[in-house]
Amino acid sequence: MATRGNLYVQPEHVHTRGWTNYNGNAVGGGQITMAKDTAELLNIFIGIFLVFAEAGLWDLISFWCFKFNRQLRKGSTGSLRDGLFHQQQTVLRNGGSPLSIAMAYGQMWKAWGLRNPEVITRTWPLILTAMLSFIFFLVALPFITALALLDNQGVEVLIRSPNCGFWKAVFTNTDTDTTASAIMTNQSWEAVSYVDDCYESDAPSTLCDRFLPQRRLPTFEWSATPCPFDVDVCLDTDKFPAFKMQTEVLDSHKDFGINAPPNDRIKLQRTTICSPLNVTRFTNITNGTVLGEKITGVYFGPIAGFEYTFGVSNYEKIATPGYHLSAVSSYPANGTAYASTFTPIEGLTRKDADVSVVFLNNNMMPIRGIDGPCSDPFFTATNQSLLKQKDFYWPDMPITAIGCTDQYAFGNPVTGQWTEPMAVLDSTDWGNYTKDWDLSARQVAAFATLTWALSESGGIDRVILGLETEALLAKKYPGVFSGFQSPIPNDQWKKEVSYWFKNGLAKLQLHLINIAIGPPDTTLSGLQNLLPILSADRDDLVEIICSSQKVHNVEFKNYHRAGIIALVAIGGFLILFPIPFRCFYTWRWKQREDILSWSSYGALQLLRMVIEGVGVHGWLGCDNDTPYLKLWGSPAGDLDAARKNDEGEKPNLLKSMLGKCTI
């Protein structure tokens, strides 16, 4: 697994077909995902498609306007069938696009009288109709189409990767440790990078705002909370009450992007409580293995090979100056210790929560005070200032510690049922404590996905194990310079635990992406996909898990599925229906007077009439769109564009032969 592998989804792992985004309902949420370049080509096609749709629609409008204009003057006095009327019918019959018809009617209005009320009444309605049609299809409809079918659909996509699964590499003191440690380290670095950019900062960016379903998970904080352990283990609870951090009730769809309808979702809430621990009471100094070495040990419970939980040699300051951050943990399951790196003393034991103890070895690094010494319990430095640096203070003790508990509660939004807050390993036994919840297949898949992601991302200890000293916020800001800690506030420890809490949330968010994507190299030593095993051969469960994770991806665009179908159906109808309909209509009733009038105003029929006017007869097909001479090759007159008469130069057709039109 490459570093930052969960912060980017390869294009080949994006589902580029139709799917339903359950941000809306099944109909409104239907989408078709495609690459950005493909979408831009489709936009061009849609523009051309709309031009043809407009042409088809206007073909029908022109036909019925022609019939209406003729019917309006049927039976009227002959004076109403004036030159303007014939020009209107000619334009409606042969005008083509609405813009060309509007321009032709505008020219008629200008020629026949700009201020003539009757001319205005007979030309402007169609001018307005044609212009509105043109504007609608040229501007409004493309804009509406782009907005409704494309822009409003966002850039959320589904991940579909062949490597999807619950992949795990365990620590077994073999070669697989390399894989397992690399995975943990990479996940921690991805999370801390994401937190620094997206949780600790409000600056807009593609990573923060256009990748995960939520930029940051919403949380609450309480500064006065009872100690989560025995009172004698916590540091002065009156002076330093515990600090509680809790997420809002998180939705598997809205907050984590596990795509599902409202009744197929799961609720989750994480609670973390941290408190400074009384290190002094549990500290003992013993002799080391080297001459003159002294080991300062904190005895919160033994770890493998040592009676103390955390020990510091007096030589460490010389060997590795600077901060040293470490953590131990206890993960209970079914009320007993199951996966632990230490055996906690009774005062630190919790059966219903994961316990993490974070140790800071300050190696006696001086801290610059703010209007006096630093009284923060994690960085406490109140000893006499340096002789030449009056504003700097020595730490009170080489080791300080913070203890934290992590708990998780799950809810069914359909029934309103909730579990009790529990340790993360207990949450993996969701099949037992939800057996009366009547979960749907999608809810089962969401439960399985979330509990696996929680167990792999872990609590506070996993953040420290993956980052070590880099998880220390004070080292980053205000920072350490030349072996001196810059001034920090007296509640810095709360900023630290809040930072770790946010890192844990980011790890959870990113691990869900990791499940959907899978490792880039599935052949790594000791790496195994446990999803087929945990799903108990339920192929439907595997399919749901591996086809439900959403992310944002600006390299892709979505089209509204129902909108595209409607656009193609309606546009195709407008393109394909009008001409066949008009052809059938005029053929079926071709001997009717109105249809004969339609045919007669055709450009070729008008040309025939002009040619007949100069004596060229013998035409056939006079009731069709295309008349023709009976004798092929017969002369049909010559156009004299420069013939002069008393009224000036006018184009004329020269006479040729006489005869009659034959139908």
Image: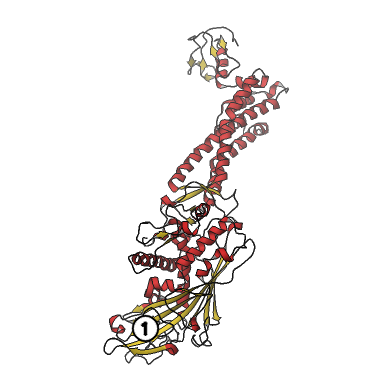
Query: Residue 491 appears at what percent x and percent y?
Result: 47, 82
Whether residue 200 is visible here, answered yes or no, is: no
Q: Nearer the viewer, residue 120 or 459?
A: 459
- Mark 1 residue element: strand
373 left or right of 589 in image: left
Above/below status of 277 relative to 555: below
Q: Quadrant of the N terminus?
A: bottom left
Whether residue 557 is visible here, answered yes or no, is: yes
Residue 291 placement: quadrant: bottom left
Residue type, label 1? Gly
Colouring convention used in this rendered image of the protein: secondary structure
Query: Residue 52 appears at what percent x and percent y?
Result: 53, 34
Residue 325 placement: quadrant: bottom left
- For the point 59% across and 64% down, the residue is 434
Above/below status of 654 relative to 183: above
- For the point 59% across and 50% down, the residue is 26
Above/below status of 285 relative to 195: below
- For the point 47% across and 42% down, the residue is 42
Q: Residues within 10 Å of mark 1 (few under 14, many from 20)?
A: many
Q: Nearer the viewer, residue 467 or 75?
A: 467
Query: Residue 454 appears at what percent x and percent y?
Result: 49, 66
Q: Nearer the viewer, residue 636 or 350?
A: 350
Residue marked by disc 1: 311
